[in-house]
Amino acid sequence: MSLATLIQNHLTAHGVPYTVVTRGVTADDNADVRVPLSKTVKSVVLQDRDGLLVAVIAADRALNIPALQQHLQRSIELVPPHDYVTLFKGWAPTTFSPFAKNYGLRVLVDAHLAEQDLAFFENGNPSEYIRVDRTGFLQLHENARFELSFTLPMNTDAAPAETPATPATQFSAKAERMKFRVQKTTELPPMPEMAQKIFSLNSNPYARIQDLAQIVEIDPSFAAQIIRYARSPFYGYRGKINSIHDAVARVLGYDLVMNIALGLASAAPFKITRSGPLGLNAFWRHATYSAVLTQSLCGLVSKGPKPRAGMAYLAGLLHNFGFLVLGHVYPAEFKLLNEAVSAQPQTPVAVLEAEIVGVSHSEIGAWLMEAWNMPPEVIAVVREHHNADYSGHFAEYTRLVRLVDYLLKKFDLGDAPSSDLPVGLAQSLGLTDVQIDTKFNKLLESRDELDSIAQHLAA
């Protein structure tokens, strides 16, 4: 049985009215017929270790692989067209769409197609198409999910390609423009002078506590914040702390104070709107809690390299830095995203980012961290803290920050998808439930002081 006959038999069996169309004329009346790309359907088959997925898109749009990866939280990749024959018993890439559900596969459909009055499928014969109306199209995809966030316009009048669109050409172009603007523009402040001095001090093997204290004390507000940290019940010190020297020598230690100061100095110039789930108040509350809890848990890591306390604190503090950069450079997009997160709290932030911004805050933040030559541990965390599969350099930091993000979702802080720890995440760090609960309860005891610190930082 030919592919064209098989397709027509399938449509008949499902009670879907259709017309066979040859490009330019109909088989019925020879009237001129245009087959617009925007209404021509193409299937793109993807895969990862969890199996296959079918994306149904219009021929004038390109699949936005990074956005779809963010949306699904899966490391998907294209299935080569020549594998379709083996996987699906002879189906061609462009004729598979109406039949995907027969194979029990998850199907995502470009919502732009659902808005069309007609849809065209290739028929298996050269230049021949099946035309169905909107009702028929929706009937064929009744179990699919319709999404707006995973395709981009191709801006071309060329005929549909015989192979799936190359991944995210337009996405890459937009990302490159945004990256250039973030890393090169004069709109962004340079690395603050205090941060530069701390970097310089960090490379000095003969530096002393007093040298660090003198830099921090240049800005009384930073000095006050560090003393406030040292006095926090979270660190359990019962004596008096009246100076930066005391905070370093008696409680926090040189490395931790250096990274606290570096983090505070780096973020200080960025002033975005204070309100909303992504605003300055929420940012600093999440950053403060995350930094302290990440630093507290890092000493308990027993699998793989053990994170350094100061670096763990800095990574926790700055891992969502991209929101600050987005709000500073792209205030209109940030406003829309902030409002969308507020209005749709159950929708993952990554999905809304892909739809509204087109680039994730993780990527935006990493671009600036690279431009500022921040420590590679911080760059890795900023870029990869949502990537469950990341196993590259400094993965111990990314896993730890990711775990903390899930824990802090219990306070409705941050952008983790839920407060349920992913299976195996704690075990990958060698952390037990008892250890995590103990540190988390200690954080609860210090909430008032941490909230006060966050309020001062957001002021």
Image (cartoon, rainbow, N blue to C red):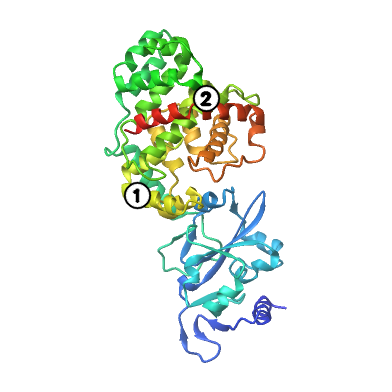
Residue 435 position by quadrant? top right
Q: In the image, what residue occupies the spot 60% across and 40% down?
A: 389
Query: In the image, is 90 to the left or to the right of 235?
Result: right
**Is residue 129 shown to the viewer in this render?**
no
Give how far apart the Cα atoms at labels 1 and 2 are. Answer: 32 Å
Could you tell me residue 432's position as x and y percent? Answer: 67, 29
| Pick the front one: 108 or 162 | 108
Residue 70, above or below 257: below
**Is residue 269 shown to the viewer in this render?**
yes
Mark 1 and mark 2 residues within 8 Å of each other at the beta carbon:
no
Q: Is tag 1's residue or tag 2's residue first in the polypeptide sequence? A: 2
How crowded pointer 2 is (Cα within 10 Å; few <14, some 14-19, many 20+) is rated as many
Inspect the image, locate mark 1, and give the three-letter code of the amino acid beneath it. Answer: Lys
Could you tell me residue 166's position as x and y percent? Answer: 51, 56
* Mark 2 element type: helix
Could you tell me residue 321's position as x and y percent? Answer: 41, 36
Residue denoted by label 1:
335
Query: In the image, is 334 to the left or to the right of 9?
Result: left
User: Can you name the residue that lies furthest to the bottom here?
Assistant: 29
Residue denoted by label 2:
295
Inspect the image, locate mark 2, and give the three-letter code of the amino acid beneath it. Answer: Gln
User: Can you name the residue that lies furthest to the left here?
Assistant: 186
- Report the number of discs: 2
How crowded pointer 1 is (Cα within 10 Å; few <14, some 14-19, many 20+) is rated as some
Could you tell me residue 338's position as x and y percent? Answer: 39, 48
- Image quadrant for the C terminus? top left
